[in-house]
Image (cartoon, helix red, strand yellow):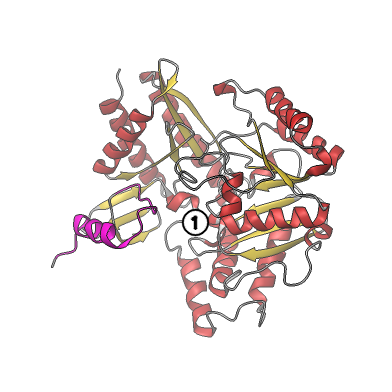
């Protein structure tokens, strides 16, 4: 029997839980750098990068070799049972890479949600407080405590009832949708007035650039005001850099562009080039607030993932991928700005580094139907894209930083054709 996308989709629907979504009805056979081939042999340009996981591309030769070499030695011991040097090496590297002029320590996990939940655990242990402030449209994961922080009910917690208590929601600043920095700070002060005293709040958590929320970047001015507020009230500032980390925004961490440092930083996704690895890095005295056994996990800091992460960091240095992220970002935004002139439905083109978003609106209102049509048309033409945003009206581009310029241009050419076909002139 010939395997096709349709036949695999039928098997998927029969075997896989309905709650596991799938954006494109395509099944991958192989991939290399920024190219994916499906089971029917069709070739696609990958502008999704596994949702920001493949900054170094699919199967970067250096990452692949590092994992293969580790596999010849051992695949697992559980670091909490028998340690290994690569775990320590990754922690040492992240202590250097995470912004902040203070002594740091790191703990490694498997998923972004784990990193977020452990960051909150550390903040609570250090401050002896229970409350957390998160932001509208923020995305912090799908596990039960992370869902309480995530600022979007459908589809993530729809039908599941109320999430964990002690989480309070502030407004994320977004000029396009009428929320100023002043408005956002005022919303935090309202929480202090109406819901919880500052002395009840352990941490304020936010993404320096919102991911699922629509690629809105907090301004350095806002982040500096937030830092001052946290310092004044003894609150831990947690930067969720699961999606922005590992070079996507043109610095290894987006907070490097904000003029201040977080007390705790989460990372995951591209840090290990497609292998499951996450972690938190924070002030040493804060991280040590949790006693032995309070942090960890059976697969946390997997030897294979640690080998991959060390290779990813080397690739960034050797191939100057931070500089390339900025160059790619300018190349893409320049092309999109030309398309914006031709199509008024492109309300905004934005992004730090190579974390690029295109917001589609019509008559001043979000236009998710255009977004869905462009995604489908692009797929038919051989380009894989993602959407995001509170209203589902934002296209996001997360092309590998190692993608050849000609391939990026080809992808942009497909996108232009999609806009010409879908959007009204």
Quadrant (top left/top right/bottom left/bottom right) for the N terminus: bottom left
- The residue at the point 27 percent across, 37 percent down is 377
Between 189 and 280, which is closer to the camera in this rendering? 189
From the viewer's perspective, tell me whether residue 178 is left or right of residue 128: left
Residue segment shown in magenta: 2-24
Query: Which residue is tagged 1?
Result: 56
Task: Identify the image quadrant of residue 418.
Answer: top left
Residue 83 screen position, x and y as percent: 67, 80
Check the image and name the residue furthest to the front.
161
Residue 338 screen position, x and y as percent: 41, 24
Check the image and name the residue furthest to the left.
1
Q: Disc 1 on helix, strand or loop?
A: loop
Disc 1 crowd, CA 10 A, few/some/many (<14, 14-19, 20+): many
Between 16 and 341, which is closer to the camera in this rendering? 16
Question: How many discs mark residues in the rendered view?
Answer: 1
Residue 41 visible to an observer of this rendering: no
Residue 324 visible to an observer of this rendering: yes
From the viewer's perspective, tell me whether residue 254 is left or right of residue 294: left
- The residue at the point 28 percent across, 27 percent down is 422
From the viewer's perspective, tell me whether residue 335 is left or right of residue 382: right
Between 188 and 335, which is closer to the camera in this rendering? 188
Task: Identify the image quadrant of residue 206.
Answer: top right
Q: Specify whether residue 3 is painted magenta.
A: yes
Q: Specify whether residue 265 is painted magenta.
A: no
Residue 20 screen position, x and y as percent: 39, 54
Quadrant (top left/top right/bottom left/bottom right) for the C terminus: top left
- The residue at the point 28 percent across, 53 percent down is 26
Residue 310 screen position, x and y as percent: 60, 66
């Amino acid at each position: 029997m010939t395997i096709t996308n349709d036949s695999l989709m039928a098997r998927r629907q029969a075997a896989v839980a309905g709650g596991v979504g799938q954006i494109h009805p395509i099944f991958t056979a192989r991939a290399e750098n920024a190219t994916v081939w499906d089971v029917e042999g069709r070739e696609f340009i990958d502008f999704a990068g596994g949702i920001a996981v493949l900054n170094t591309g699919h199967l970067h030769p250096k990452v692949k070799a590092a994992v293969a070499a580790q596999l010849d030695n051992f695949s697992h011991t559980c670091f909490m049972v028998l340690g290994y040097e690569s775990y320590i090496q990754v922690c040492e590297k992240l202590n250097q890479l995470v912004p902040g002029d203070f002594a740091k320590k790191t703990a490694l996990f498997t998923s972004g949600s784990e990193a977020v939940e452990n960051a909150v655990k550390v903040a609570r242990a250090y401050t002896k407080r229970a409350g957390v402030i998160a932001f509208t449209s923020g995305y912090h994961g799908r596990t039960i405590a992370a869902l309480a922080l995530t600022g979007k009910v459908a589809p993530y917690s729809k039908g599941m009832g109320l999430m964990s208590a002690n989480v309070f929601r502030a407004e994320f600043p977004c000029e396009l949708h009428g929320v100023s920095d002043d408005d956002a700070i005022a919303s935090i002060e309202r929480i202090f007035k109406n819901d919880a005293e500052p002395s009840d709040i352990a941490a304020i958590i936010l993404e320096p650039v919102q991911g699922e929320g629509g690629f809105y970047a907090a301004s350095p001015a806002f982040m500096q005001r937030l830092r001052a507020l946290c310092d004044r009230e003894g609150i831990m500032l947690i930067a969720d850099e699961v999606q922005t980390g590992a070079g996507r925004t043109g610095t290894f961490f987006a907070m490097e562009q904000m003029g201040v440092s977080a007390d705790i930083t989460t990372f995951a996704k591209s840090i290990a080039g497609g292998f499951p690895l996450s972690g938190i890095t924070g002030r040493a005295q804060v991280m040590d607030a949790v006693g032995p056994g309070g942090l960890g996990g059976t697969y946390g800091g997997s030897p294979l993932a640690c080998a991959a992460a060390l290779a990813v960091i080397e690739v960034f240095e050797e191939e100057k991928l931070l500089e390339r992220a900025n160059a790619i970002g300018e190349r893409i935004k320049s092309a999109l700005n030309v398309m914006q002139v031709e199509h008024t439905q492109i309300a905004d083109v934005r992004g730090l580094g190579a974390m690029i978003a295109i917001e589609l609106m019509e008559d001043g209102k979000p236009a998710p139907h255009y977004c869905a049509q462009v995604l489908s048309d692009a797929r038919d033409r051989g380009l894989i894209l993602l959407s995001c945003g509170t209203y589902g009206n934002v296209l996001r581009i997360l092309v590998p930083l190692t993608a050849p310029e000609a391939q990026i241009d080809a992808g942009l050419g497909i996108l232009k054709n999609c806009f010409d076909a879908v959007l009204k002139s």
